[in-house]
Amino acid sequence: MAKHHIEATVNGDAIEFLCETEETLLDVLRDTLHLTGSKEGCSSGDCGACSVTLDGRLVCSCLVLGCEVDGRRIETIEGMAQGEALHPLQQKFLEHAALQCGICTPGFLVASKALLERDPDPSETEIRYWLAGNLCRCTGYDKIVSAVQDAAATLRKG
Amino acid sequence: MAETQTNGNAQTYVGTRTIRPDGVDKVTGRARFGADFNLPGQLIGRVLRSPHPHARILRIDTSKAEALPGVKAVITRDDFADQSSEFIPAGEMMMNYKDVVRNVMAREKALYEGHAVAAVAATSGAIARRALKLIDVQYEILPHVIDVVEAMRPDAPLLHDDLFTVGVEPKPDKPSNVAKRVEITLGDVEAGFTKADVIVEREFRTAPVHQGYIEPHAALATVSEDGSTELWCTTQGHFIVRAHCARLLGLDISKVRVTATEIGGGFGGKTVVYLEPLAIALSRKAKRPVKMVMSREEVFKASGPTSGATVRVKMGATKDGKFVAGFAELKYQAGAFQGSPVQPGVMCAYAPYDIENVKVIGYDVVSNRPKVAAYRAPGAPISEFAVESVVDEIAKKLGLDPIELRMMNAAREGTKAAYGPKFGPIGLEETLNSIKKTEHWNTPLRKWQGRGVASGFWFNIGGETCASLTINEDGTVSLMAGTPDIGGLRASLSMVAADELGIPYDKVRPIIGDTGSVGFNFLTGGSRSAFSGSMAIVEAAKQIKADLCARAAKLWEAKPEQVEFSGGHVRPLGALAEKAKPMSIADFAKIAGKTGGPIGGYGRINAQGAGPSLGTHLVDLEVDPETGRVTILRYTVAQDAGRALHPAYVEGQFQGGAVQGIGWALNEEYIYGADGKLQNAGFLDYRMPVASDVPMIDAILVEVANPKHPYGVRGVGETPIVPPLGAIANAMENATGIRFTELPMSPPKVLKALKERGATAG
């Protein structure tokens, strides 16, 4: 069967690609567009390492088919920093040592950004439940939650 | 910034919370992990795995797969020469190449569901998958055995007909599934029990749990026509991977160059090889690069986990609370090949305590499960869980405070450990004191809530380590280490280098060198990389400082004793100070060519003197009597770090280990059906803790300096996973009055226990 021709926006850039029906958005991002910041931890939507936003909504890119994103807007970890300036979440993750191995970090950052866009002042419990779809095996989540709280405070100050 | 002195150097950075040098790459998605590497013209490799837990492989016909367009290579057992039996150290465990070659590719038999039977390289993953279906394997299905106790029965199905139990007299004349019996003794345990006023004996069971790293195993290999081999893989030890691959594939070590990619978690599980030799064998056959990545299901079925076990503990104490005898018998699952962490389990069981009479026996037992791999303080959480549970029960029987009881019996400097050595300075008492002083320990609890405490021990290791410091032309420093950075190593080593050389932290750029760039390094494990790496950096810096002093003496036409290195400069002393001006490292860098050539130092050491790290954990939890679900309400870790090079990453080790322990205690387990197949090979059903399952984890850094390390460092990574199992079981007893002896304490088990008891306590 012929490949699908897809046009979409990725991190603000108009792009087009061809994909097989069974290819996931994660496959397309990593293998076709070479955006390897989104990670594959499980391929079943359980670990959140492949988190991206699709038209502003947080999704696991391993659960979205490449051919579903025609005409849509995708944001990945690669689009998070603006020029030389890290996003406050990225900066706070570094300051709080909120990563050890770093494999889950892109997913946590994308998910946290989506949270703070919905709710600029989430409670600790709200942060923990929002991030419950992202697995981290190194940190025990403590410093991740602190970093998100601190980034939220920074963003609120504008 | 506060400055302290160690080793004659000002400590500007050591002990502070610097930003890790590799951090920006990791928050922007730029860092390249195992699966992020690609080469032009690469093929995709996939593995055919046994659907049976135990089966003889009668015949493998790959002809149809080979004929499929796009398939470039197929490999089976025939592509690997057999290996003779030889035990070699692998992390804290032992391994045997005869088993390794069989584990990476089944030979006579498939020994567990998921055991590799063949592998294919094709122009796409889809073609490779199709090719796997075309491989015809004829199996003779054999009876299997999963449980460790059943595997020890004389009539159990035998995995290896040449496995005779080592360590028993007389030498057995029949093979069995018991590979080894080990024993340690101190004093006379039987005599010890006669002095006891109270004796508690219990049997415990723990389930196998997986290390659970989020990054699956991945390897990319390319072999040229002359046999030169390059490999990129996610590993805790690329030198070890090189050794294994060279051995299994009959290559000279010098022909194999291995680059450790960024590693997405390991916890011991990435100290062995799975895909790496297969990728090389496929590439050698196809003469093209081959990339292989495991699926999560493959990670669960064919890598890790750690042992499940059955443990019997019997302890005796006087009525005042002095421990007088400790006995334990440990039966650890090794998986399909021998080599469980029962030996360290035996050694650690009673290590936190000063007991005159100890006897611990361990059995290493094979069964039809994936071969276990190291998992954070391998073996120790299991045996110490059992002992810490019994310690708590003794405290209850004697009406003593559990912290006081531990304090009374705590191992301290000079204590003779049952496993051999006399301890130097260690910090168990300090951690117990710190916990006792917390507000946490003194807050009241409500109905269905419980509080538990437990301590834990891990040896820590040192070992072979090479690291270099190179002074660049502009005075900046390139640091090269050879142990993969799994959570802040580059930051820690750069801080030590900056302080040793008296230069700004951001002038040091660290990298992890490949096997061709730096001398041999043992792997990242045993909590050795920051300990040993910093010792190698101190040595490298020492050479640089001596060299610069010699160059200065020559330039200034002075005697060696007239110059010294301090604060990043070579300084003239005495009368010379009037004639010559101090010279910085950057000053020397500019004139390196005229004063003796390139400037650098190379630490090449076999690090000794790793000090044990002891810790104490305190947990509050609440049991839901309707569902059996347990919620962790509050958690505090106190652990002796010796000296925390980077306090935030040390705390991170404490917190992460505690949460892995919480998962082990409450939820995680390998669940097998009667068919011998794993039923929960995915993150949905193998339930690791998520952010909403746990509270903040308070971390208390205790620093009892390790006198054998220039900065006082102890390894810190392993110990934090040891106490949680016991602490949570003790809190469960406190909450419900029920002594849980079987892990995990998952909702169905808790609910059943509450129902049997009549759910009246709390």
Image (cartoon, coloured by chain):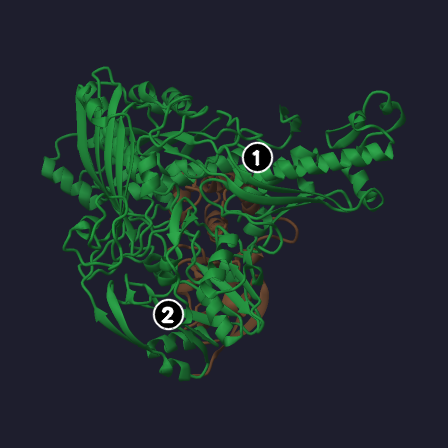
Chain colours: A brown, B green
Nearer to the camera, B240 or B276: B240
Task: Answer few, some or many: residues within 10 Å of disc 1's Cα (few below 14, many 20 plus, some between 14 and 19).
Answer: some
Q: Nearer the viewer, residue A137 or B722?
A: B722
Mark 1 and mark 2, same subunit? Answer: yes
Expressed as whole percent of the image width and height from the top left, the position of residue A104 reads 46, 51
Q: Which callout, 1 or 2, points at the residue further toward the start of the chain?
A: 1
Secondary structure type for disc 2: helix
B606 to A62, vertically: above or below: above
What amino acid type should be assigned to the residue bearing mark 1? Arg
Specify the quadrant of the image occupied by residue B21: top right
Image quarter of the C terminus of chain B = top left
Q: Report how far apart the C-alphas of labels 1 and 2 lie in the structure.
A: 50 Å
Figure quadrant of residue B54: bottom left
Q: Is residue B488 left or right of residue B446?
A: right
Residue with the mark numbered 1? B17
Q: On what subunit does the disc labeled 1 rest?
A: B
Can residue A54 be seen at all in this image of the molecule?
no
Q: Residue at x 55, y 35 (%)?
A: B646
Establish if B114 lies above or below A89.
below
Q: Which one is in front in this view, the residue at disc 1 or the one at disc 2?
A: 2
Q: Is residue B514 visible?
A: yes
Mark 2 residue type: Arg
Q: Measuring from the top left, give residue B676's x and y in whole percent.
A: 22, 60
As helix, strand or loop, the secondary structure at mark 1 comes to: loop
Is the N terminus of chain B in the top left, top right, bottom left or bottom right quadrant?
top right
Identify residue for label 2.
B77
Q: Residue furthest top?
A: B320
